[in-house]
Image (cartoon, helix red, strand yellow):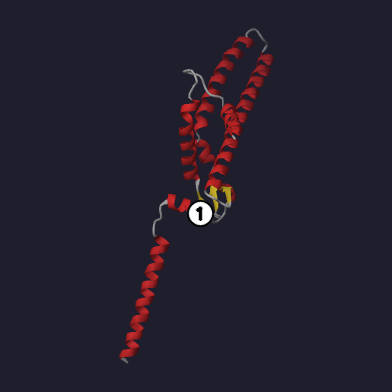
Amino acid sequence: MKVLASKTKSILLVLILALTTGLFILFNPVERTAAVSNMAGRIAYVDLWVIFNYHPEKANAEMELKQLAQSMQVELEEKAKGLPKNEQQDLLEQYQSLLTQQERDLVQNIIEAIRKEITEFAQEKELKMVLDKNNVIYGGIDLTEEVINYIEEKYKEAAPEEDNTAEGEVDVVEGFVEQEDNEQ
């Protein structure tokens, strides 16, 4: 009877130890950087729009659009003087169309830069695949924050070389993308 009780206690102790170890491994908070550095061959996802909103070029694009809108408004007001209402409306629609197209182009250039930066990040981390968050139902690792940090570091490193604009002047988004393409 003592042998049976001893074996039962041993088995119970081993089960408790295994359960505790399993729970510890399952719920142990692992540093994100350690998790990122140890994910070769894994599938991950990012939220492109969150990255877009944090992208350093977004502020430049917004400033450029604001300046363009202001200059177009002044030009529109000058050209519209003395024109009939229907011609003023046509002119306004032309200017709005131009401004909308410029905004689309700037956004597209930033998205292309983001995709390139995500590809570089994924290659460095040896990821198998990176998807947009909107295309993921289950699984994968969310690397949005890590990609934002990667892009910010990349821009900090490039800032001294690129910061040669006059005060009040805005770098054109295409200029940065072209410069990156020329470096390779």
Q: Position of residue 96 (x, y in %)?
A: 63, 23
Residue wearing tag 1? 39
In the rendered view, would you say 6 is above or below 95?
A: below
Residue type, mark 1 in image = Met
Q: How many marks can you see?
A: 1
* Residue sitting at x 68%, y 11%: 84
Query: How many other residues sit within 10 Å of disc 1, few (<14), some (14-19) or many (≥20)?
Result: some
Q: Position of residue 135 (x, y in %)?
A: 59, 49
Q: Position of residue 157 (x, y in %)?
A: 46, 33
Looking at the picture, tell me which residue is in the foreground, 101 or 168.
Answer: 168
Left or right of residue 23, residue 120 in this image: right
Secondary structure type for disc 1: loop
In the rendered view, would you say 108 is above or below 41?
A: above
Task: Identify the image quadrant of residue 89.
Answer: top right
In the rendered view, would you say 163 is above or below 16?
A: above
Q: Position of residue 158 (x, y in %)?
A: 49, 31
**As drawn, which residue projects farthest toward the top?**
82
Quadrant for the C terminus, please: top right
